[in-house]
Amino acid sequence: MFQIELSTHEGGPALRLEGELTIYSVTEAKDPLCAALDEQPALQLNLSAIEELDTAGVQLLAWLKQEARRRGKTVALFAHSSAVVEVFDLLQVASLFGDAILFPPSSRPLAS
């Protein structure tokens, strides 16, 4: 199940994405994310509660960043969950997003 909650980050509005951002939920996620992009010049997405991410979810996030740039806006990703970090690392797409991988305290990887 996928949910979006309104929150704040560094004094500005943010959206906390929660659950599974997969092929089964990207359609339901796209409309509210587009609406938020319409309303905000700078959109911040908290990824700390993403439990599962697949290539469809990655494509949605990449499209959202690209669409924001096209509109002269920004989308920032922060507090990446371990599921997000794992998929970004596997697909080697972290640099595509241009956001620092910032872990929420509960999902910080253990040192080797």
Image (spheres, rainbow, N blue to C red):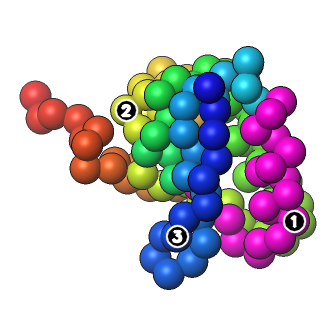
Percent position (x, y) of residue 55?
A: 66, 22
Q: What element carries label 3?
A: strand
Mark 2 neighbour class, 10 Å CA radius: few under 14, some 14 to 19, many 20 or more:
many
Percent position (x, y) of residue 35?
A: 85, 57
Question: 22 and 61: which one is in front?
Answer: 22
Percent position (x, y) of residue 28?
A: 80, 33
Residue at 78%, 61% (x, y): give it: 36
- With 91 as the anchor, is 107 left or right in this view? left
Depth check, mark 2 against mark 3: the one in front is 3
Could one spot residue 69 in this view of the protein? no
Q: Name the residue under label 3.
A: 8
Q: Name the residue under label 1.
A: 38
Q: Label 2 vs label 1: CA separation?
A: 29 Å
Residue at 54%, 31% (x, y): give it: 19
Q: Label 2 vs label 3: CA separation?
A: 21 Å
The segment highlighted magenta reads: 27-45
